[in-house]
Amino acid sequence: MQLLNTSIRKLGALALVASLAFGPVPTQAQNLFAPVIRVNDSVVTAYELDQRARMLTVLRAPGNPQELARQQMIDDRLRIQAAEAAGIVPSPEEVLDGMAEFASRANLSREEFIQALEADGVSAETFRDFVRAGLSWRLLVQARFTGRVNLSEAEVDRALGASGGSSVRVLLSEIIMPAPPPQAEAVRARAERISQITSEAAFSQEARRYSATATRQAGGRLPWQNLDDLPPVLRPLVLALAPGEVTAPLPIPNAVALFQLRGIEETSYSAPTYSAIEYAAYYLPGGRSDATLAQARVLASKVDRCDDLYGIAQGQPAEVLDRQTLPPADIPTDIALELSKLDPGEVSTALTRSNGQTLMVLMLCGRTAEINEDVDRNQFAIGLRNQRLQSLAESYLSQLRADARIVSQ
């Protein structure tokens, strides 16, 4: 594997090992084994932290290796502590099998994988500790939660009705800047500048300053979204990004959009795809003026579903309310972006029409799921159970973090 078939270029690490084995331990080496993090009654040494960061770098894990290593080491300590408290300690044979299974993902044997890691200065013990923590947690989660994720046939049927599609989900931040004609050139220049940002904090600062969406106060941060929920035009742009990178400015009616990738992962089940999306747009004159936005908030408080908009529009010209049911690929990009953030019955007031003179009150009516008749029912049920098991595990780990005493030395 290209990620691991690298030449030996960490001679400093080998020199350190030799000095530890054959000579007095210098002060610098002693400091490597000093605690840098205390997690309840366990410690993480500088050496362990450095080793984990090296391994993450070799495996090209997304994000900052040092920050990710720190979080992983804290979580690993919590996982092992919880497992040991429950009487769960993997046997040496189970750990070796786990190492072999992990190595097989790179089409390597356990020995070949360890050799490749050692060529980059990562010890076999670091790999073993990584696998031991993950295996301890897996056994604990199975013992603690398996009985709570039983599925009825009806639940599987309902989930199958919303199945099919990509298993990739992404964590994005957004900036959508209004660009009425008099300001269009200045907004485009600003968007070009923002598109060069690689810092999440810097992007969030720009979002708070310039974005017109409801996520502005959160620094433009969006929750995890299935890739298939995004507009078709945006999916390849997002997949081309590395974490921290920003799309090129995306022109949409009366505005410019930018998206920063904060995270990407493959889930253990297939996310839903949709044959059609139904939405309604109610138009208010006045654009994004304070008075019009206040009127929109009052309107949103009075409606719970798209049918309620007919009562609001009664006696007005027909063009004030537009209700559509379209395949996802046929929905205008800016509308599709907003709909991807909404649940049925929710409203967005981020968009305008008529060169910014008309505010669009956009409501998602519903989504029609594609049913994949070729899905293996048993495999689908296993994936659904694993998804629920993972959710329970993540909640439990969050609870352990909240209850833990975590101190940086």
Image (cartoon, rainbow, N blue to C red):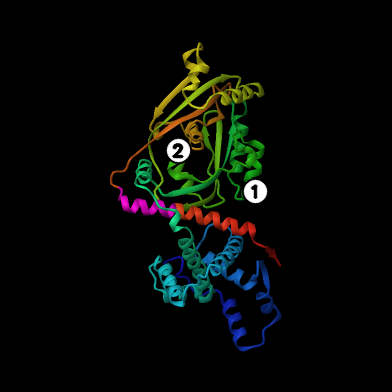
> Which amino acid type corresponds to the residue marked 2 in the rendered image?
Pro
Image position of 356 with respect to 246: above or below: above
**Chief secondary structure of the magenta portion:** helix
- Residue at x-position 52% and y-position 52%: 242
Q: Nearer the viewer, residue 262 or 274?
A: 274
- What x and y, as percent, mark residue 388? 45, 52
Considering every residue shown, the one lying at the far top of the view is: 315
- What x and y, as percent, mark residue 141? 48, 61
Q: Nearer the viewer, residue 228 or 394?
A: 394
Dot 1 alpha-carbon crowd within 10 angstroms: few under 14, some 14 to 19, many 20 or more: few
- What x and y, as percent, mark residue 163? 37, 44
Image position of 234 with respect to 396: above or below: above
Which element type, helix, strand or loop, lies under badge 1?
A: helix
- What x and y, as percent, mark residue 338? 51, 34
What span is colored magenta in the figure?
375-387
Is residue 160 rendered to the left or right of residue 407? left
Kindly identify which numbered label has been placed on residue 201.
1
Dot 2 alpha-carbon crowd within 10 angstroms: few under 14, some 14 to 19, many 20 or more: many
Considering every residue shown, the one lying at the far bottom of the view is: 22
Q: How many marks?
A: 2
Kindly identify which numbered label has been placed on residue 231.
2
- Residue at x-position 34% and y-position 43%: 157
> Which amino acid type corresponds to the residue marked 1 in the rendered image?
Ala
